[in-house]
Image: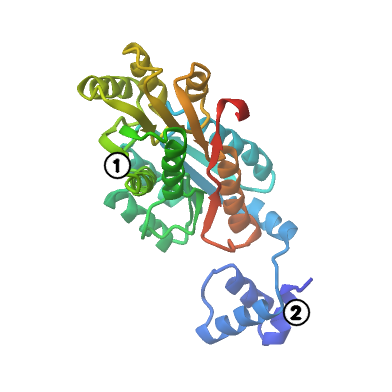
Amino acid sequence: MVTIKQIAEMCGVSRGTVDRVLNNRGNVKQDKKELILSTAKKLNYVPNPAGRALVSRQNKPTVGIVLPAKGLSFFDDVIEAMKKAEEKYNLFGLNTIWRLTEGYDVELQCEALDELMPRIQGLIINPINSHEVRERLLAMRSKGIFIVTVNNDIHEAGRHCYVGSDYRNGGETAAALLRLICPQGGRIGVMLGSFRMFGHQERLNGFQSVIEQDEKFSIVKVEEDNDDEICAYEKVKAMLEQHEDIGAMFFASSGGAYGACRAIESLARRKKITVVAFDTVPGVVEMMKAGVIAATIYQHPRRQGQKAMQLVYDSLVNGIEPDRELHIMTNDIRILQNL
């Protein structure tokens, strides 16, 4: 294994200088920095995890976790996986600060980011797609904070990695699935969590792009429910009362799926409407067993949580930077028989 001492000898500098460059601590002339980085790369230098862990215990790097998870069953599996990883990584010096909010409230998310900014070296966030959030993430990046977006992405905000599903492909998959199980076509109602979430919008775009290829289908209406069950119930009931010819529905997020299905049941339309949804949260599973939801798309929430924590740990504790920006989970089709 190549050591810092060997790199220092080859470059004609001290071990302290090599350490400052490899750990991005500054105070090194640009020409020496470039020489050290080039030499380390040529020698395939990999930081010693045990040594970095010892230093990490002293420095106590902290990761902030910001998720709009209150009241959303989807995040239960994400958080469970993150908590499990947290227990392991805490032994190696990684601390965590959790900030869980409710709904897609830009102000609340910005307050959490403002509070965490001076206290953390890493961030895992499910970001709301807003200028205010983007500004704060860019400020964090400029301070050297390592940023991972999980389950939802945000563009031009300085994040290092995204962990989650391909939202556009998820929408395309849902549309192709609906075309398979409803070859006769029909008029479609769509529910999604929030247009403020980049992923929800991308999922809708993907769905529309495939549905528009088949003239037998048409989208009647698209509504937001803020991933709220009561809101979803009321909006779906009103939609179905206004458009009695709707024969299919697409739920682009799972937050309001249970309430939406209850609205379908309340109008005795269960056998007349084919529903494609997302995720395998308890409410979705219950409605699949009840025969309301025909199929759903699974996006591996536990793997998302575990991978996000691993990336932060590797960067802050082991000094291992990610080998790519996008860590994409497959969109898997689930029916009642393979849940």
> Which residue is at 64% across, 54% downward?
56
Residue 6, disc:
2
Residue 195, disc:
1
Residue 185 located left or right of residue 19: left
Q: Quick one: 31 or 252, which is closer to the camera?
A: 252
Residue 323 image offset from top left, x and y in percent: 59, 63
> Which residue is at 49% across, 16% downward?
290
Residue 39 located left or right of residue 176: right
Number of numbered tags placed on the structure image: 2
Can residue 190 be seen here? The reply is no
Q: Is residue 84 above or below residue 43?
A: above
Q: Is residue 246 above or below residue 32?
A: above
Q: Quick one: 278 or 60, which is closer to the camera?
A: 278
Determine whether the residue tagged by mark 2 lies in a helix, strand or loop.
Answer: helix
Which quarter of the image is occupied by the N terminus? bottom right
> Which residue is at 55% across, 69% downward?
24
- Foreground: disc 2 or disc 1: 1
Sequence-wise, which precedes: disc 2 or disc 1? 2
Few, some or many residues within 10 Å of mark 2 (<14, 14–19, 20+): some
Residue 78: quarter of image: top right
Q: Quick one: 269 or 110, which is closer to the camera?
A: 269
Determine whether the residue tagged by mark 1 lies in a helix, strand or loop.
Answer: loop
Residue 131 image offset from top left, x and y in percent: 27, 52
Tag 2 near tag 1, CB within 8 Å = no
Residue 313, disc:
none
What colouring does the structure picture have? Answer: rainbow
Residue 260: quarter of image: top left
> Which residue is at 70% across, 68% downward?
46
- The amino acid type, in three-letter code, at marker 1 is Phe
Residue 232 image offset from top left, x and y in percent: 32, 24
